């Protein structure tokens, strides 16, 4: 029996749940691409860097690390955008905790970008 606090959408199972989850993911990607400049820039960067990784990486491991680091930036950016949207939905007023949440999300994106620089730098300099 479901608690009254659970989402009514949690009852889906099996193939229907997978189909729904895929649809939600596509909608999330489209929303981020439409509304988030940073995500759009990272998508365009990925369109360049991922094929380049296949060319520049010498081993499968190098290629995988280069591609994974680029995808990690996109994942972290999506999570950061989700936090920002949730915070803004709650209130657009200036609040110390809202600023902290947004700054922490921004720091996560910064570290993901640092991983790209480190991985690509080490692969290209080796």
Image (tube, grey):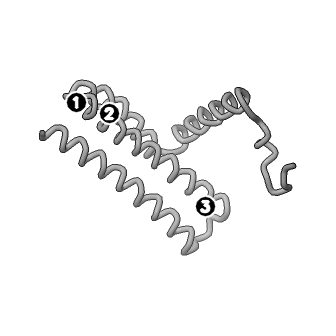
The answer to which of 37 and 79 lies nearer the viewer is 79
Q: How far apart are the alpha carbons under marks 1 and 3?
A: 40 Å
Callout in the foreground (3, 2): 2
What kind of element bears circle 2?
helix
Q: How far apart are the alpha carbons under marks 3 and 2?
A: 34 Å
Residue ID for mark 3: 87
Circle 2/circle 1 CB separation < 8 Å:
yes
Q: Quadrant of residue 26?
A: top right
Percent position of residue 29, x then y: 55, 36
Q: How far apart are the alpha carbons under marks 2 and 1?
A: 8 Å
Q: Is residue 123 above or below residue 18?
A: below
Circle 1/circle 3 CB separation < 8 Å:
no
Residue ID for mark 1: 57
Please report the residue visible at 60 percent of the width from the left and 54 percent of the height from the top.
85
Q: Residue furthest front?
A: 1
Percent position of residue 36, x then y: 50, 45
What kind of element bears circle 1?
loop
Q: Along the polypeptide, which appears first: circle 3 or circle 2?
A: 2
Percent position of residue 14, x then y: 72, 30
Q: How many C-alpha atoms fall within 10 Å of the one at disc 2: few (<14), some, or many (≥20)? A: some
Q: Along the polypeptide, which appears first: circle 2 or circle 1?
A: 1
Please report the residue visible at 37 percent of the width from the left and 29 percent of the height from the top.
47
Q: Quadrant of residue 63?
A: top left
Circle 3/circle 2 CB separation < 8 Å:
no
Percent position of residue 56, x then y: 20, 29
Q: Quadrant of residue 16?
A: top right
Q: Along the polypeptide, which appears first: circle 1 or circle 3?
A: 1
Residue ID for mark 2: 64
The answer to which of 49 and 72 lies nearer the viewer is 72
């Amino acid at each position: 029996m479901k608690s009254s606090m659970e989402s009514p959408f949690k009852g889906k199972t099996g193939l229907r749940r997978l189909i729904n989850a895929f649809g939600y993911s596509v909608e999330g990607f489209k929303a981020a691409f439409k509304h988030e400049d940073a995500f759009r820039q990272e998508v365009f960067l990925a369109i360049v860097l991922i094929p380049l990784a296949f060319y520049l990486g010498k081993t499968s491991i190098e290629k995988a690390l280069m591609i994974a680091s680029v995808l990690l930036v996109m994942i972290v950016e999506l999570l950061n955008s989700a936090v920002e949207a949730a915070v803004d939905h709650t209130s657009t007023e200036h609040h110390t905790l809202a600023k902290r949440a947004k700054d922490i999300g921004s720091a996560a994106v910064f570290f993901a970008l640092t991983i790209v620089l480190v991985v690509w730098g080490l692969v290209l300099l080796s």
